[in-house]
Amino acid sequence: MGVSLRKWTISLLLWFALASNASAAPNRPELVVGLSQFPTVLHPSIESMIVKAYALGFVHRPVTAYDSDWKLVCLLCTTLPTVENGLAKTEADGGMAVTFAIEPNARWADGQPVTTDDVLFSWEVGKHPQSGVANAGIYRTITKIDAAADKKSFTIHLAKASGSYNVLTDFRVLPAHVEKAAFAEPAEYRKRSLYMAQPTHPGLYNGPYRVVEVATGSHVTLEPNPHWAGKPPAFGRIVLKTIENTSALQAALLSGQVHMIAGEMGLPLDQAVSLANRLPPGLKAEFKPGLVYEHLDVNPAHPALSDVRVRRAILMGIDRRAISREMFGGKLPLADSSISALEPIFTTAARHYAYDPRRAAALLDEAGWKQAGPGPRRNAAGQPLVIELGTTAGNHSRELLQQVIQAQLRQIGVEIRPFTEVSRSFFADKVTKRAFTGMVLYSWFGTPGQVPRSTLHSGFIPKPENNYSGQNFTGYANPKMDALIDALDAELDPGKRTRLWHQFQELYADDLPALPLYFTTATFITPDWLKGLRPTGHDAPSSLWVTDWSRDQGAAAQR
């Protein structure tokens, strides 16, 4: 009886302690983050949006990620496998075996441990041709996964040796105990996944935070994951507030409706530069150059855009240097391909397209688009050279850029018809489903040295029969590019890889699968009291390191 009473007393004390901790969470400070887009989905592997990656950074751990120093580090694993430490080995058949150990205390927010069951399930989803996964390439290169008996370590077997053998940034681990039922019919998985149907289910998230509220088009609310075993996050609640009109987003910051504006998907650079010059006390701006690649995707089914001469003419008809100078204070380096000069693999040998309207007009003549009078050029069939140009609604910079491009290309006989669409449908329908008829303006966030298999290899063109898997939204198909991508994936020698990267950039600039504009600079507008935020400059968002963020109470008290 006495033992039972003692156990009951201890249990009661534990309950009070847990209740006390739970009630303390709301007393921790709240952080409201302003964003200019709303994530269409929160599934880690379906659809490609920078704003989704930012939101997931708080709530979902990738296996590995590049940090703010551009070094590959473990987030869900314990030790980064390398050939040097013996965790990565070449195999007799020319492939590789790479062993990862899952953080021993990693748990989903419903308390279930993260195990190799989740890894195996994620691989099953990722490689299935009907699952709708955006970057299926990483899953298809894996031929087998061996899971240890303890369910906390696993070995992936790659079909070929690869220079990126330990980069599992896009291998997103999904909760098998929650998601397996939704995958019973793979072709319906995009619709049935709980990330779509019940995004506040705690079992979906294994990061320091979990999603507790989703108000479509308005905000996503996050609260601490009670089963997070890492460094405790400082904020009791984080609200990701979407204001798609970037002028209204500025006003929300200045009025205190939001505490900060994320650099990953916040203000365009022109507005950010203007705002930085008139920020009130208590706010600061940080500019981070990086791998954000602004470009024009083209639809090769368009009667003009299928001809590389027309694509080259369009690029030479846009005065990108003047745009950078006049709109962005000269802060935007021009792009010749998808590789930035900040990367050691960059080469100056690739074709460069300077502003040259005379040469652009000559190329259009060669391609059969003649200027016979006022208005746009026409081909032999009498079709006018009219091209739609779409982008995300509410982004002041892109909407202005549309108008500039329209005016400049009209001078060479190309008529641009701009349209905008809210980001949710723009990316879900126009881009992912390749429903644009002409060109679309948006940006990619790159990872250092990332092989662009999913975006440029012909095997990853989204289409109805593969449930729109892949990110090759232009439908680009060139056997030379496919071979280069395969060679880059397989090459381990750094010098040989660099030479392959140079060939890649030269082919990209020759073919122009997309029209490169510039590499932009992200702007983080933050309060003085927010400490620990470090912009990365690439596609691993700063939110992945939210446990390093804190509120300086002294700075807050001074305001």
Image (tube, rainbow, N blue to C red):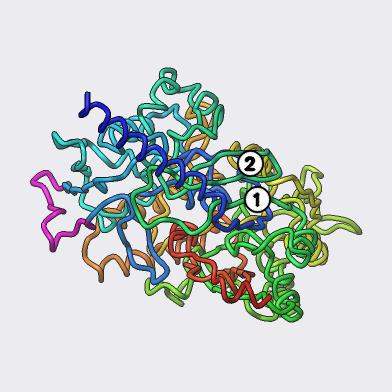
Which element carries disc 1, helix, strand or loop?
Answer: loop
Q: How many marks?
A: 2
Q: According to the image, label 1 marks what residue? A: 305
The amino acid marked with disc number 2 is: Ala
Apparent side of residue 78 relative to residue 472 in the rendered image (left or right)? left
What residue lies at 77% left-to-right and 49% top-to-bottom? 420
Above or below, comparing residue 418 to residue 522 in the picture: above
Image location of residue 74, percent across then percent down? 30, 57
Above or below, comparing residue 260 to residue 26 in the picture: below
Q: Residue furthest right?
A: 374
What residue lies at 57% left-to-right and 76% top-to-bottom? 554
Above or below, comparing residue 464 to residue 115 in the picture: above
* Span colored in magenta: 79-94
User: Which quadrant of the figure has residue 147?
Assistant: top left
**Numbered mark located on residue 301 in the image:** 2
What residue lies at 22% left-to-right and 28% top-to-bottom? 2
What secondary structure characterizes most of the magenta part?
A: loop
